Every structure is written in structure tokens, then in C-alpha cells.
Amino acid sequence: MTVGILVVSHSAKIAEGACELGAQMAPDVRLEAAGGTDDGRIGTSLEKVMAGVDAANTGDGAVILCDLGSAVMVAESALEFLGDPSDVALADAPLIEGLVAAAVAAQGGAGVAAVKAAAESALALQVQARIDGTVLLNGAGVRSASGPEPSRSVGGVIVEDFEVLNQLGLHARPAAVLAGYLGGLDVAVDINGADGQSVMMLMTLAAAQGSVLHVKASGPDARRAMDFIAEQCRSGFGEL
Amino acid sequence: MAATLGLDWALDWLHRAGAVLAEQRMALIELDRVIGDADHGENMERGFTAALAKLEAAPPATPGAALKSVAMTLMSTVGGAAGPLYGTAFLRAATALGDAEELDDAALLAMLTAARDGIVARGKADPGDKTMIDAWTPAVDAAGAAVGQGPAAVLRAAADAAALGAEATEPLVARKGRASYLGERSAGHRDPGAQSTSFILRAAADAAGNA
């Protein structure tokens, strides 16, 4: 099993919708929604949150994501009522961006601390990516004139280029597929300057159809990683 | 005057708190309408109505158990920020009392202090931010100064100080909660959370005066 995730929102619809989105990227992760009050109004419910923590934690721990102020207070209160369990963590992250990053990290087999860290780095990574935008987008997000180059190995680092073939490009779902798989490997992957194990970083590449992914992989699982990326790109992430 | 207060006092307190919050529902709504989202009166009344029903359905054995039951219900029924804040206050108060059956001056001071500290920890507000802390903090200080004069005097000192504290939030500019969105425009209005705190602590003192 994986670390589970609980979404706490003032709105039942937001909580359920967020879980729906996360489930698309992390099919094996237990995602639980605790939105609205017990009688279906806007607000948060301690009982729903406590039940959600129980349901999300199937033995490997859980991470909680919240929307606004009092949702955070209710989540903190729930943990206090539960005796501050050591395998449940509250992430200080934007709900949707944090959830996507956390779900993908959990899908890749990360532990509670790493899933929490993935959620909390989501916003910082996006901001940094915008600052670094000129570097990151160089060669991605735009069509490459030269096209992919053949595979080569430079000082133990495998370097290969792949063209993005599917119409929608490297959007959220494929980014989650790549980061989810790569996150479970012992490898360092750089895709056009982005960390291949970070779904948020991959999404910031905005790599459109026809753009070239310049991939550098190193570490014990470098070959496996490259083969997986190659297969995903060939099949247009299953969208061709 | 009784030298200690027990379960009867705790239940009387909670019933009186529920009654005053129901009676003052419109007044709290009006305070909250000006600088918040106009739901505090309704939320508190609903929370206490549910809490009192739960006390009827599952009678507690000690004052601490009564406060813990109320804590749990408030957090699940109030909805707004007041739910986790008052919920945490009652939960920490319950923890401070443990399974004591009779409460003396020191126990009551410990209870009030734990409640205030819980709200500070949960809401991360400081004195002067125009929140319920501005009623709780002077209440705890006054209760501390009255220790030794008997439970009723301790609670009366707390209630008197909370009332003054609530009144003193009027000129303040809110720095926490919904009212802080209004900035300078929040000045000139009393904080609804400080006012409900004043009502709840007055109920505790009134119940002790009758014990």
C-alpha cells in the first residue's frame, strides 16, 4: 500500500473534486475527502476529518491537505483528539498543487515525510520555475527545429532525446505518470532542466506536441528510467 | 459559598452558556455582520444546542468529561473558525481538569489557563489582535489574582475581566480572522468572539454563584 491522503475543505464538492483529480494521477493511492459540515453546509467537521484520517491511513501513514484557515484548525484539532499520531502529517501547501504533488509522490512509494515535503514544495517549485522560466523553457514548450538526437552516454550519464507526439503534450496526467514511475527508481533524471521525479516541475515545462524532451539519467536505474520514458513518449503517453 | 465546584456546576454552566448564546444570538450576528460574515451567533447557538443534547444523551461523570463532550460537539457542528477555537479551549480545559470531581480555585485557574493557551495555539493570535484572546487573557490574569478567595470569586473575576476585555476590542484594528480583511474599517466595532467569550465566562460565574 501507499501513504494515504486526506483532503479537508469547507466544501464537500471541492474535497471530492480534488480527490477525483488526484485519483487520475495516482490510481493506487487512498484519497479521502472530508468536506463540509455534518449537515452538508459549508464548513468543516471534526468528525469527518477524524473518520477521514482513519480511512486514509491504511497502515503506511497519511498526509492531510487543507483549503482555508479554519480547515487547518480543524485538522490540527483532529490530530490532537487522535493523540497526535506519528504517522499522520499536515502539509502546509496549496490544496490542488500540493495534492497533485503529494499524490504522485505517494504513488511512487514515498513515505509520509517525503509526501508532505512534495506537497509543500509544490508552490515554491512553481514560483521558482517562473523565475527560471527562460532557462526551463529553452527547448521545451516550443517546437524544436533540429529534432531529436540519437542516444549517447556521457561520463555514466545516459542522454537521449524524445519527441512529444500526443496532441495535448506533457500535460498533468503524463507528467504524473512519468514522475510517479521515476520517483520509485534509484535514479536522477533531468528533463529539459526539470527534475523528472517532480510532477510539478514537469508540468512547468509546458512541453507541447512536437517539442523535444532532452533527458539525462544517471544512477543504478538510469537504463530502466530511460526505457520507460522512451516507451511513454513512443506511445504518446497512451494518447495516440 | 461552596469551597469547591463539581459536576452540577459544570452542567449548570454549560446550560447557562447555551441559554445566553441563544438569547444573544441576534446581538452576536449583528456584531459579526459588521466586521465578519454574520454567522457567529447562529453558529454558536447551533453548536451549544447540539452540545447540550449530547450531554443529555450521554451524561458525563466528571466536569472534565462534560467539557470534553462539549469540545467534540462544538468542533463538529459550529462550522466556522469558532468551532475549532472553542473546541480546543474546552478540550484543553478538560485535559487540565483530568478526572477531578471537585474543583478548587487552583483547578479553575488551571482550567481557564489551559483553555486560553489552547486558543492561542490554535488561532495563533496575540493580545491586541481583536480576537477572543482579548477577552480570555485578562480573564485568566484576573482569575489568577483572585485565587484564594473561593471558586465563585475566581470565576466572577474572570467574567468581569472578560467583559471589559470584550469592550476594549472596540477601538482595535483586527489583525486576525475575517475582520482583518477590513483593516482600519474594523476599528469601532466589538469583536464577536470576544463577546461570546464574555457571555460564556459570565455563565460560569453565575453558575458558581448559585452553587
Image (tube, coloured by chain):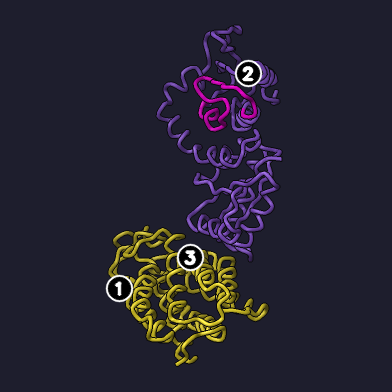
Chain colours: A purple, B yellow
| Residue A195 horizontal side relative to residue B173, left or right | right
Circle 1: element type: loop
Distance CA(mark 3)–CA(mark 1)? 20 Å
If you read the primary sequence from the N terminus, does the residue marked by circle 3 or circle 1 appear first?
A: 3
| Mark 3 Cα-neighbour bin, 10 Å: few <14, some 14–19, many ≥20 | many
Is residue A236 placed above or below B63 in the rendered structure? above
* Closer to us: B14 or B68: B68
The picture places residue A214, in percent across and down from the top left corner, at 55, 15
* Residue behind mark 2: A220
- The amino acid type found where label 1 is placed reads Ala
The picture places residue B195, in percent across and down from the top left corner, at 40, 75
- Magenta span of residues: A183-205
> Quadrant of the image for the C terminus of chain A?
top right
| Mark 1 Cα-neighbour bin, 10 Å: few <14, some 14–19, many ≥20 | some
- The amino acid type found where label 2 is placed reads Pro
Is residue A192 in the magenta section?
A: yes
Same chain check for tags 3 and 2 = no
The residue sitting at 61% across, 47% down in the picture is: A87
The picture places residue B99, in percent across and down from the top left corner, at 58, 75
| Chain for disc number 2 | A
* Residue behind mark 3: B85
The residue sitting at 61% across, 56% down in the picture is: A35
* Residue behind mark 1: B168
Distance CA(mark 3)–CA(mark 2)? 51 Å
Circle 2: element type: loop
